[in-house]
Amino acid sequence: NAGVTQTPKFRVLKTGQSMTLLCAQDMNHEYMYWYRQDPGMGLRLIHYSVGEGTTAKGEVPDGYNVSRLKKQNFLLGLESAAPSQTSVYFCASSYFQGYEQFFGPGTRLTVL
Amino acid sequence: AQTVTQSQPEMSVQEAETVTLSCTYDTSESDYYLFWYKQPPSRQMILVIRQEAYKQQNATENRFSVNFQKAAKSFSLKISDSQLGDAAMYFCAYRSAWGGSEKLVFGKGTKLTVNP
C-alpha cells in the first residue's frame, strides 16, 4: 500500500515550458487535491476533484489545468510555466469530505 | 471566507517538557472540522489530530491533545513529554462540513524546535 505518490520529486523548468505532475493513490479515495506551498504562506488549494471525470477550481487556479481520467490518478499541468509558479506542490486524497486528507511527498518545482 | 491564524511563527521546548501551539480561526459556519498537521524536514504532511466542531470533547492522540474552544474560535495543540522527533512545522487547518467546500484552509505554520 503505497498511499499517495507523486512524480517527479524535483523539476527545473525554463519560463514558457510546459510539464505535467502526476499524482497516484491506491486507497480508492474519491476526493483528490492539488496544493502549492510557498514560504510563509502555508498550503493553498489549486484544483480538486470529487470523483473520476470531475474537476473544480480551488483558491489559486490560474496558470494550471487538471484532469482526473482515472479514479486513482490526478494530473496537474502547467502549460506555460512562469517564475511565480516556483513552489512545492502537494497532492492529497481523502475518502470523503471531512475525512483525513493523505498527502504525497511533494514535488519541488523551480521555474527559471 | 474562512481564515486560520497561527500567531507563533516559532516555538521551542525542552525535551520531555510540554508545549502548546496556538491556532485561531474565523468562520460564520457552525459545523466544520479542524486539523493539526505535522511537516518534518522530509516535507511529508502527517495528520496529528482531528476535531469535529459538533463534538464538545477535546480530541487526544497519545501525547497530543487539543483545547477546542468553539465560542472563542480557538484550537490549540498541546504536546506532552516532547521528543526530538516532534521537531517540525505544525499547521492548523480548517475544513467546512458543507458540501462543495472541499478545501482545507491552512494557517501559515509554527516551527517547533525541541532542545535536548
Image: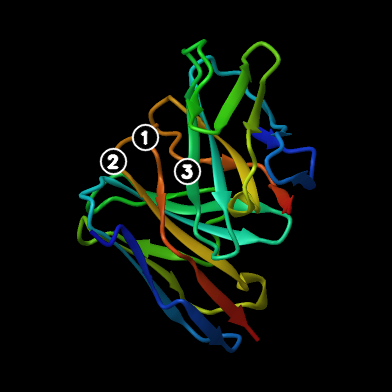
Q: Residue at x 66, y 34 (%)?
A: B3
Crowding at mark 1 (Cα within 10 Å: few <14, some 14-19, many 20+): few
Vertical comparison of A79 with B6: above or below: below
Callout 3: helix, strand or loop? strand
Front residue of B86/B92: it is: B86
Query: What separation in Å lies between label 1 and label 3 (alpha carbons)?
Result: 11 Å
The spot of residue A60 in percent (x, y) is: 57, 54
Measured as percent of width and height from the top left, residue A65 is found at 42, 65
Label 2 lies in what chain? A
What residue sits right under mark 2 in the picture? A95
Q: Chain of mark 3?
A: B
Q: Chain of mark 1?
A: A
Q: Exactly how many numbered labels are in the figure? A: 3
Give how far across and how far down residue A106 sits, in percent.
Answer: 48, 66
| Contact? badges 2 and 3 (CB < 8 Å) | no
Nearer the camera: disc 2 or disc 3 = 3
The residue type indicated by label 1 comes to Tyr
> In the rendered image of this protein, does residue B75 appear above or below residue B115?
above
Residue type, numbered disc 2: Tyr
Specify the farthest residue to the bottom. A14
Q: Quadrant of the N terminus of chain A?
A: bottom left
Distance CA(mark 1)–CA(mark 2): 6 Å
Classify residue B106 by image quadrant: top right
Where the C terminus of chain A falls, by quadrant?
A: bottom right
> Which residue matches tag 1?
A99
Q: Are marks 1 and 2 in contact (CB under 8 Å)?
A: yes
Mark 3 sits on what residue?
B47
